[in-house]
Image (cartoon, rainbow, N blue to C red):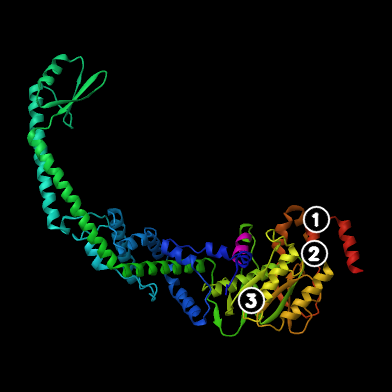
Amino acid sequence: MIFMDENTKKSLDFQYILNNISTLTPYGMMYKGRLKAYEQKEELIQELDKLEAILSAVENKTLRKEFNNIFAHIKDLRTSVRRAMEGFILTEVELFEIKNFLFLIKDLYKLIEENTIPVFHDTKITPIESLEKILDPENTGISTFYIYDAYSEDLREIREKKRNYDKEIRLEKKTIKEKLEKQLSTNLRPDSSLVIPKDDKELLEKVKENPYLAYISETYMNIKFAIKPTEIMTKLEREVQILKDKEEKEELRIRENLSKEIGKRRKEIFRNMASIGKLDLLLGKAKYALDIRGIKPKIVDEHKIEIQEGIHPKVAEFLEEKNLKFTPISIELKEGVTCITGANMGGKTISLKLVGLLSAMAQYALFVPAKKMTYGLNRFIKSSIGDMQSTDSGLSTFGGEIKVVQEAISKAEERGLILIDELARGTNPEEGYAISKAIVAYLKGKNSITLLTTHYDNVANLDEVAHLQVVGLSKLDFEGLAQEIAKEDEMDIINRYMDYRLRVVEKNTLVPKDALNIAKIMGLEGEILNLAEEYLSN
């Protein structure tokens, strides 16, 4: 069963949460992409305990910086390791990257050991010392890769001979160069070439007769000559080329052997990659927990949701940018239906989103932004929030909404969380009220927890249906707002004074008429407002 469909994730702003969990390694990003809700209580508690245990490592900024420095240098080497496993010969670049990875594993292991950071079965880092020694036979401790002479006696001999021949060639060239400079009374360039102006006829004649110089090229002003290889030099260079071919074959053989050694240790390498990824993700989750001042939710068997002073991180960030503060929301939910009533713009939807988001975060083993949270696992979370109009299927807003609600209702016998915002708002009030009340009556005895918002009166007046109301603007002195309304943006005023807290009310309590108050703040004509109040009173 799908825990949350894409529409629900989007409406709850769940992707916003994931975007704020920072992972630096390709393996951490991979595991972040695979994040799923936990289905078993014991596994979820274990993961939350791990997150709690690792928090101290993130609180230490110096330590976190050291982790980040190591993680930032880790590359995705899965393809190279698979190539080695399948018998391919790795390139020198691939061998360098794997050697560097081994050194980073060792650095990570030391960092964890020296700082006594908690280690779990799936975050255990294990240095592969045997492979380190193979890729660093001279024990340089440097991450750069080179096919060392120590890999093969044959390679050592080949390179030694090559160096000797190169030395002999340089000596032969040097001898000829000195002889030429003496004969011609001029200096050759460092590359043993000689450039002569075309108008220096005398020197050109000498050069043309000299057996040690050969014509190379010319411009409209100069002619270039270079030392002509002697028989000794030609023979030596032929020997060097033969040795180069032998060296390349020997290096290929060594790279083949090294690739096989890497292939043999693939399980150890892949285990470390997995551990690094899970550790990276765990640290990212811990960092985000600190950023939102999150707490560990208490996971219980009973199917209920209790949130004390919860905060919706995305909305809180939006308000903070305007120098406003999010009003924490507290709510207790159990199986059956809870209705939230209040005027439009009164914060009902925020409460709905907060419950869904914090529930999803808890079941994904994330800390939640609240003072306290008690949570019983759900098999699914399904929401109908926002404009449900579907251009693909040609459904109207009401049709799209009913389609989503029906999908939720079909699962209502299961242990889940159903969130419905302003039910039947896309149709006429009489039918909307009737459908809303009928759905509440149907869902109230089901196993799911249903949280529903409505601006209709008397939808929540059924037995066994909990009725909550948003405090909204009910405590506001509108007469005292006159000066502020003249000076400030109306939306900022609403955001500042809107009280999103919920209070339990009697089931027959009518929906507060905050709509008129909001219209007043937004500057609707006084004459219209007076007429509206007259119609309302009648």
Q: Visible in this render: residue 287?
A: no
> Which label sits on residue 523?
1
Q: Position of residue 280 (x, y in %)?
A: 42, 66
Residue 367 in picture, x, y percent from top left: 53, 72
Q: Tell me what residue is drawn at x 59 percent, y 72 percent.
A: 358
Q: Which residue is mark 2?
A: 515
Mark 3 or 2, closer to the camera: 3
Mark 2 vs 1: CB contact within 8 A: no
Give the crowd class for mark 3: few <14, some 14-19, many >=20 residues within 10 Å: many
Which residues are drawn in magenta? 312-318
Dot 1 lies on which element?
loop
- Our reading of the magenta stretch's main secondary structure is helix
Residue 7 numbered mark, or none = none
Q: Which circle, 2 or 1, is nearer the viewer?
A: 2
Residue 87 or residue 274, whichever sits in front: 87
Q: Is residue 310 left or right of residue 219?
A: right
Asked if residue 323 lies left or right of residue 504, the reply is left
Q: Quadrant of residue 327?
A: bottom right
Q: What residue is pinned by disc 3?
A: 417
Question: What type is the residue that disc 1 sits on?
Answer: Gly
Indicate the amino acid at tag 2.
Answer: Ala
- The kind of secondary structure element at disc 2 is helix
